[in-house]
Amino acid sequence: MSRNPTALPNGQRMEKGVLRRSFMSTVGRASSVSFCMLYLILLGRPSYAAPFTEIADAGSLPATAEVTSGAGLLTEIAGTLTPASGDAQDMYKIHIDGGGTFSATTLDGVGFDSELFLFDASGKGVYANDDVEGRDFAPSMLPAGHPLTPVTAGDYYLAITQCCSVPISSGGEIFTVGGRDHRAVSGPTGAGGDSPVTGYSGTFVQNPTVGGPYQIFLTGAHAAAVPEPEVFALMLAGLGMVSLFTRRRKIA
């Protein structure tokens, strides 16, 4: 019995058996590529950059902090403080890569005087800053390469407040920010520095109704929550099918 050939452009012909083998070979290559990509993703965190925007009202303590999500480098967090409605502090759970590469800096020109605080996974203070310059409304910065910059990778909590709302623990204030030198990068040297954060104290330098939007620019950080492997698998399967479809169109 004769085989039924399949027509190709320019008068070429391909038998079904050959076309089937070509099809299966393409599927195999697409599957291999997808598997390799998935393996690399699961082996380490992706390196492309992504911002994160406050979804709901971020809480102010580790138990209520907003968990950053995404699949790349966490380069920016954007949100809003509304002190008039009791939202004078926002906290985010992030993943720090370690090695002293982490930094966090607020955008200059924010409509309120910001302060930044970093806590470890247990809620204990790491370091803090009020103003990078000796003036109100100056950006706040937690620098990279500082003796207090985390060298251990892991999950941490980053908080932003309107000055001068400062974190406290059961023992008192955790950091000694402000005072004579608002530019100082402070460790947890306050009376409550040995205990996890439980709330905030202090009075606002400005009208408590000020607040407003903010942006925090980051280095050396990833989102705390990455998509599940199953999600990546579905994404890569889709990429494989696109590759397969493109190759079949070239053959046709």
Image (spheres, grey):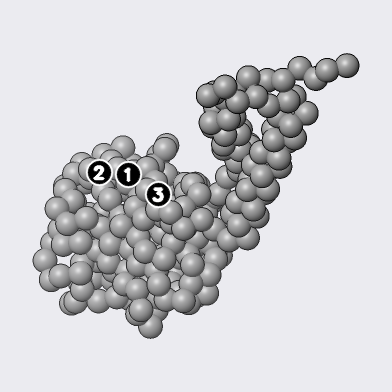
> Badge 1 is on which residue?
79
> Badge 2 is on which residue?
213
Q: Helix, strand or loop at disc 2? A: strand
Question: x, y (%) of residue 39?
Answer: 65, 55
Q: Residues within 10 Å of mark 2 (few under 14, many from 20)?
A: few
Q: Are marks 1 and 2 in contact (CB under 8 Å)?
A: yes
- Residue 176 visible from this viewpoint: no
Between the residue at mark 1 and the residue at mark 2, the CA separation in whole angstroms equals 6 Å
Amino acid carrying label 3: it is Ala
Pick whichever of labels 1 and 2 is earlier in the sequence: 1
Amino acid carrying label 1: it is Gly
Q: Are marks 3 and 2 in contact (CB under 8 Å)?
A: no
Q: Helix, strand or loop at disc 3? A: strand
> Badge 3 is on which residue?
50
Single out the mark in the foreground, 3 or 2: 3
Q: Would residue 125 be found to the left or right of residue 107 on screen?
A: right
Q: Helix, strand or loop at disc 1? A: strand
**Quarter of image, res 30:** top right
